[in-house]
Each structure stands twice: as structure tokens, then as C-alpha cells.
Amino acid sequence: MNAAQRELLRGALLIALEASGNYRPAVATLRIGVRQSGHNVTEEEVKAELQYLIDAGMVAREEKKISPENSGYRITKAGRDHLALEGLA
């Protein structure tokens, strides 16, 4: 995957998380969503880009107390601000 494809994937992940509202999707669910928008990616690639977005402060991991193995992700204020600045929100 080249730099332009990574940038598009990151944007698609942010859009998917924004659309998720209060639902906290897991990696597998996010992968299905971005694949439907044309990104043919593996779970490992999704995890890597989510980690990048976490490091950038645009995404946070939400751990469930009862079933931590089903933890998911949410967009942060910085992620929503980025979408707005890019005209994607």
C-alpha cells in the first residue's frame, strides 16, 4: 500500500467511526466497512492504521469491562475536527 492509499484508508476509517455513533466497532467490523468502500485490506493493515490514528489522537480504543476481547474504537474530537477540515464531515 502506498502513501496515498494509506491516507485514503485512514480517512475511510475515520468516516466509518464517525458514522458508528455510540457503537464501538471492532477491527473486523471496520475492515468490512472499508472494504465496502473499495479498500481491499487485511485486518493487520486496519490495525496498523488504527494505531497510527490513535497515536495522532484521532481515534481511541474503548475497552469493555465485561468482554474486553470485544473492545472497539471510537473517533475523538481531533478525528472529527480533521474530517471537518477535509470537508468529509
Image (cartoon, rainbow, N blue to C red):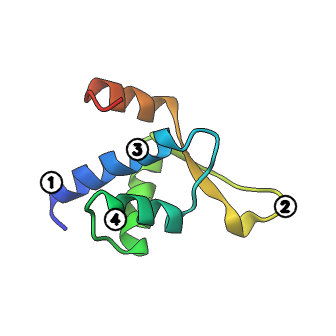
Total labels drawn: 4
> In which quadrant will I find the C terminus?
top left
Quarter of the image holding residue 22? top right
Q: Foreground mark, 4 or 1?
A: 4
Q: Which amino acid type is shown beneath numbered disc 4?
A: Arg
Residue 45 horizontal/vertical position (percent):
36, 69
Q: Nearer the viewer, residue 2 or 89?
A: 89
Residue assigned mark 3: 14
Question: Residue 79: x and y, percent?
Answer: 43, 35
Sequence-first tag of 4 and 1: 1
Q: Which residue is mark 2?
A: 66
Mark linked to residue 4: 1
Above or below, comparing residue 57 to residue 69 in the picture: above
Left or right: 21 in relation to 3: right
Callout in the foreground (2, 4): 4
Name the N-terminal-most of marks 2 and 3: 3
How far separated are the C-alphas under marks 2 and 4? Answer: 29 Å
The residue labelled by disc 4 is 35
Secondary element type, mark 3:
helix
- For the residues marked 1 and 2, what is the alpha-carbon distance in whole angstroms? 38 Å
Measure the C-alpha gap from mark 2 to mark 3: 26 Å
First in residue order: circle 2 vs circle 4: 4
Mark 1 element type: helix
